[in-house]
Amino acid sequence: MSEFSAEFSKNLRAAGVVGAGGAGFPSYVKAQGKAEYALVNAAECEPLLKKDQKILERWPEKVFDGLDLLMGAVGASRGVLGIKRKHEKLIPRLKEIAKSRRNVSVLEMGDYYPAGDEQCLVYEAAGRVVPPGGIPLDVGCVVSNVETLYNAAFAPRPVTETFVTVNGGVKRPATFRVPVGVTWRECVERFCGGFTVKDPAYIDGGPMMGKVRTDFDLPLVKASGGIIVLPKDHPLIVKKAQGRPTFTRIGRSACDQCSYCTEFCPRYLLGHNVQPHRVMRTMLFSSGTEGHKLNSRYGLLCCECSLCSLYSCPEGLNPREACVAAKADLREAKIGFKNSGLDTGRKPEVHPVREFRKVPVSKLVRRLGLEDYNKDAPWTDETYRPSKVRILMAQHIGMPCLPAVKEGQRVEKGAVVGDVPADKLGCPVHASISGAVSRVNEKYVEITA
Ligand code: SF4
Ligand code: SF4
């Protein structure tokens, strides 16, 4: 590792920078790799979320600064920012900045889902297919999200705020920046004028890959990207909240093995052996039987994009959840891709019709029943000073933090309130406001202003 890479990676860890695209992978680890391409994932393909677009409208230079640093750390000779061409007002400015940076370009992509899947972006930007079970670094690429690079540009300044969009059933959909640890309820009330739907639920992280929740008092974390508020009985909420007994019972009786779920699967189209229609066959077998295990393997490389469940299946079934359940069963049986019998070691071949099976987001929004909720969520500059925040100890992939403060202690904004041992995967979390530590437990540190 070069001296620059070691320094940058140290700064990222100290700042607590994690992937802000939802996964929360600690960024310092990526900065320690070697890659030819550094890619900015600005595709933001989850319908109704806008925060990356708004960051790029306001602070494009900072995002390119973060990219420059990442390129320097991993030794990349090319930097590419991938963004949908529908942002035609923003793209000329991005291209102008890219021209002023060394070896950086802007890639315009169509408005389809999932353009932001990192393996799809790697293929579009570098023409390389990540090997099955592999990561972008295996083909000389490192991928970072817009907000992550924005935060990286300021490292070692601690990450104490997060950018989010609140859209759907609220009076004024909006995109804004708030201290980590405030609640979604505060966001809705303070920035969006309250709910417009009775009995609201929400999808945390976007309609496709996000999770259904009903508790608006949950605190935001560094990787929070936004929520879509919907009535609890909206078909999307009902479908996404289906439990295993329900999707198994319905799937067992209604799946006709048409294989549309497989034919549209973005990873299958990249040449990976993901076949959700075969995973659906597991419903005919009991969990743990040979028939169950043999077919479950075809879900191991599923990236959980939800396209099969929320778009492709003409019967409205839930192959995505079948894949998620299959992966869990195989994990328990200690079967991963490498020992599944599917790892042939052959180079994946991209499907010849991949280009024509990209799913337009406009069509997807209609299919999801979100047309009435698909509004702009303009940026609001308002600053929010909460009286209390809860900083969760588990905010990223890796080991959860251990509290580093005691009840009654005074902390300043930016102070470390939780950390992981240096030899473990993870990074610190910081106070997002100044105040007194009012509660400490293994789940969170509460600070009262
Ligand atoms: S698309 Fe639906 S019905 Fe067809 S195989 Fe997949 S799960 Fe079964
Ligand atoms: S969720 Fe469905 S479409 Fe998406 S990767 Fe998994 S199997 Fe393929």
Image (cartoon, rainbow, N blue to C red):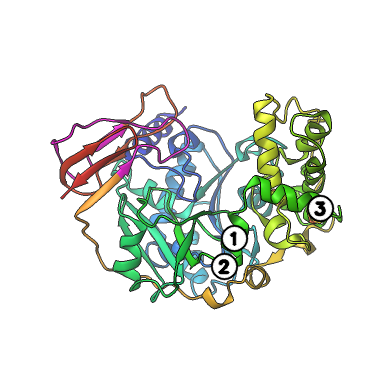
Q: Which residue is mark 1?
A: 238
Image check: 206 left or right of 288? left
Point out residue 37 in the picture as x, y percentages from the top left corner: 58, 45
Check the image and report above or below for 423 versus 93. Answer: above
Is disc 1 placed on a helix, strand or loop? helix
**Magenta span of residues:** 391-418
Viewer-proximal residue among 79 and 31: 31
Question: Does residue 205 appear to the left or right of 4 in the view shown?
Answer: right
Whether the magenta-drawn stretch holds residue 397 is answered as yes
Q: Which residue is mark 3?
A: 253
- Whichever of labels 3 and 2 marks the residue nearer the N terminus, that label is 2
Amino acid carrying mark 2 in the image = His
Residue 102: x and y, percent?
A: 49, 52
Q: Which residue is mark 2?
A: 234
What is the distance, in whole Å, between disc 1 and disc 2 at their CAs?
6 Å
Mark 1 residue crowding within 10 angstroms, few (<14) / some (14–19) / many (20+) = few
